[in-house]
Image: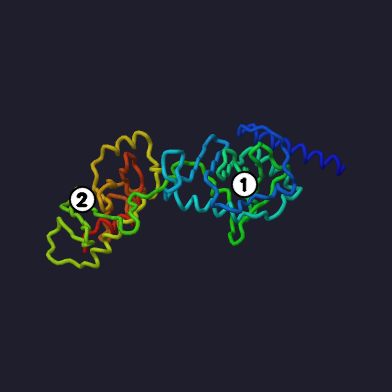
Amino acid sequence: MNRNLRLFYILIAVTVAAVLMREFGQTGSAEIDRIEASSFAIKDTALVNKIFIADKDGNQALIERVPGQRYWTLNGEHYARKDAVDLLLKTFKRVKVQSPVPQAELVTVNRLLAGRAKKVEIYQGDDSPAKVWYIGTSTQSHTGTYMLLGDASGNVAEEPFITHMEGFTGFLSTRFFTDEREWRYTGIFDFPGRSLGGVRVQGHETNLDYVLRVDSSGFLSCTGMNKTRRDTIAMQNHFNRFRKVHLETYNNHLSESALDSIKQVPPAFTLTAWNADSTVTANVELLWKKPTMDTFDEAGNLNPWDGARMYARYKGEIVLVQTFVFDPLLSASF
């Protein structure tokens, strides 16, 4: 009986390996040394230069480190979110095996891995991945993640493990997403240190239009406003708000017809920022967004626009931004 049961589990493991290799286009033996099968962690994440994530729905994300650049690239077209990349690198280094998968759960876990696992290839400078992870669902307690280890030759371990990160309560699978819109770097204005040279704020429905500019000596001036006296500290603080400004998401939740319509809407505000020698300029147009639910102002009047979010035109795309972030930038109270 025990011999037959062991043979059954081996057949299940071989089946899982065959499915994974078929789904992700690899061939090879379904065996990895039992001792190495739990060796998920990457000791030196500084050597990681490429991460490839694929899911069973055909979605893929390729994140690559570019020497000399502050941000990794995404699918060869965009910058990737630094916080998301850093989280993956931390996971690679700190992941540990919590326990083997209990025998009673092994068949179910193998079936889930075969059907819904995400494949993660981790590269460290070579053309072939240093490790390959197959990431399944969370445990019932949501404190562990089912994972299976593979290698560059297409070999897959005979058994999965339950993994976790010490000091973290939760599961790891949500860190490995493939949606390009979620992965894209959200920075609109990104002027680190003292690299911000100037900004212009335009309110197209009012007479708001002013420029803050730093000259070669570091003196900050303001033009376009009629005030004769200004609070220089308040003006400097306002200027500094433009150094790092982010949009909320590239997922605008609009249908194609609604997207075409909103592209024709004139902006309510335009914000422009440039670096010290005017070689880098960033521009964003803000548009009002209809509310998703009725809200009222302090006088009890119905608000015509969403108080939490606005649409924005940025580099030819319609994105969502938070008024919490942009309202202070539109102020001229200094």
In terms of image quadrants, where is residue 124? top right
Residue 80: tell me if it is visible. yes
The answer for how far apart the CA atoms under marks 1 and 2 are is: 49 Å
In terms of image quadrants, where is residue 165? bottom right
Three-letter amino acid code at the position of disc 2? Gln
> How many other residues sit within 10 Å of disc 1, few (<14), some (14-19) or many (≥20)?
many
In the rendering, at what x and y percent does residue 149 appear?
A: 66, 44
Look at mark 2 in the image and give the residue it sits on.
202
Going 15% across and 52% down the picture, which residue do you hit?
A: 207
27 or 15, nearer to the observer: 27
319 or 85, nearer to the observer: 85
Q: Earlier in the sequence, mark 1 or mark 2?
A: 1
Question: Is disc 2 placed on a helix, strand or loop?
Answer: strand
In the rendering, at what x and y percent does residue 235 appear?
A: 23, 63
Three-letter amino acid code at the position of disc 1? Thr
Going 69% across and 33% down the picture, which residue do you hit?
A: 28
291 or 312, nearer to the observer: 312
In the rendering, at what x and y percent does residue 326 appear?
A: 30, 54
Is 90 displayed left or right of 26 in the figure?
Answer: left
Question: Is disc 1 placed on a helix, strand or loop?
Answer: strand
In the rendering, at what x and y percent does residue 65 appear?
A: 48, 46
Residue 182: tell me if it is visible. no
Quarter of the picture holding the C terminus: bottom left
Going 86% across and 44% down the picture, which residue do you hit?
A: 2
Quarter of the picture holding the N terminus: top right
Mark 1 vs mark 2: give the one in front: 2
Is 147 displayed left or right of 248 in the figure?
Answer: right
